[in-house]
Structures are given as structure tokens and as C-alpha cells.
Image: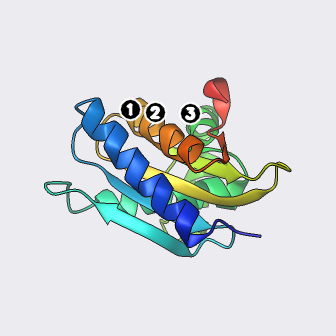
């Protein structure tokens, strides 16, 4: 089972609402299914040109490694050579910064991931967590905040 279009749409819309409620910088949000395919995406006005690639890379990296990008960032700091090789192996698609959150169903199975980019990584993640909760799903950002 993967995240549905309805769930992904809720995640994106609530993530962006949380961003506006917290006066975040303009965000870009990408929701991927369990196979890494894009399900839903929105980019706010004035969100930078690279923000889609960053948001997608945060979500894709979380799916590819099986844990949130907060954990990816922690591990990258400890083993930079390994993450340089992962970046090469992934064709540059993986972004190891907080803001890539695994989406789990009630049984705990990974059904997708959301990636958020535009503000600080912590704020990106905070907004994404709100979106996942609003969709009635479980969030797994990895690392200290999981």
C-alpha cells in the first residue's frame, strides 16, 4: 500500500497552511509514494528554482535509506565519504538534511515520504509533520525528533 492522492493532497495543503501560520519562507512540498514516484507537489510563489529538487531529494533519500533525512544528516556528518558515494550512486537525487519525512500507516509500514524545502530544515520538518498528522498518518522524521 502507498500513500493515496487524497492523503498526499492533505499533506501538501496542511504543510503549506502551517508554513503561512508560522510565517515561514515560501515552501515547496513533494509527496512520494513507497516506490519513490511523485504523488503530489506544490511550490509557493517566490519559492526558489532549486526547491523542487531539494524537496524531492529529501523525500527520495528518506525512502531510499529507510529512515528520515534528519538521521541521514546525522550520519552524513559522521561518515562524509560514504555519503559522497551515496550521492554519486543516487545520481545526486539524495539530500541529507532534515525535512525528508517517512510516512507510515497505522501498522507502521512505510507508505511514502514527504520532502519540504524553503525555510530552515527544522521549520520545513515542523510544517511537514503537521501535514502528515492532518492526513491521519504517522510521521517518521528520524533522528532525535522521531
Whichever of callouts 3 and 2 sits on the residue coming sooner in the sequence is: 3
Q: CA distance from mark 3 to mark 1?
A: 20 Å
Q: Position of residue 48 (x, y in %)?
A: 20, 56
The residue that label 3 is drawn on is: 77
Q: Position of residue 135 (x, y in %)?
A: 58, 51
Q: Tell me, yes or no, whether the two marked residues, 2 and 1, touch with CB atoms within 8 Å.
A: yes
Crowding at mark 3 (Cα within 10 Å: few <14, some 14-19, many 20+): few
Q: Nearer the viewer, residue 13 or 129?
A: 13
Q: Nearer the viewer, residue 88 or 110?
A: 110
Q: Residue at x 63, y 44 (%)?
A: 68
Q: Which mark is residue 123?
A: 1
Whichever of callouts 3 and 1 sits on the residue coming sooner in the sequence is: 3
Q: CA distance from mark 2 to mark 1?
A: 5 Å
Instruction: Give the structural element (helix, strand or loop) at label 3.
Output: helix
Q: Is residue 33 left or right of residue 40?
A: right
Colour pattern: rainbow
Crowding at mark 1 (Cα within 10 Å: few <14, some 14-19, many 20+): many
Residue 97 visible here: no
On the image, which quarter does residue 22 sit in?
Answer: top left
Q: Position of residue 102 (x, y in %)?
A: 64, 50
Q: Quadrant of the C terminus?
A: top right
Amino acid at each position: 500500500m502507498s500513500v493515496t492522492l487524497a492523503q498526499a493532497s492533505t499533506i501538501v495543503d496542511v504543510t503549506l497552511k502551517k508554513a503561512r501560520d508560522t510565517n515561514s519562507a515560501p515552501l515547496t512540498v513533494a509527496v512520494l509514494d513507497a516506490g519513490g514516484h511523485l504523488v503530489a507537489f506544490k511550490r509557493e510563489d517566490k519559492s526558489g528554482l532549486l526547491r523542487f529538487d531539494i524537496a524531492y531529494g529529501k523525500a527520495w533519500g528518506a525512502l531510499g535509506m529507510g529512515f528520515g533525512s534528519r538521521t541521514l544528516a546525522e550520519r552524513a556528518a559522521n561518515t562524509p565519504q560514504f555519503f559522497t558515494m551515496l550521492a554519486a550512486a543516487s545520481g545526486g537525487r539524495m539530500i541529507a538534511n532534515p525535512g525528508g519525512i517517512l510516512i507510515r500507516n497505522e501498522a507502521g509500514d512505510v507508505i511514502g515520504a514527504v520532502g519540504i524545502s524553503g525555510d530552515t530544515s527544522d521549520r520545513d520538518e515542523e510544517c511537514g509533520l503537521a501535514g502528515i498528522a492532518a492526513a491521519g498518518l504517522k510521521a517518521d522524521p528520524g533522528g532525535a525528533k522521531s
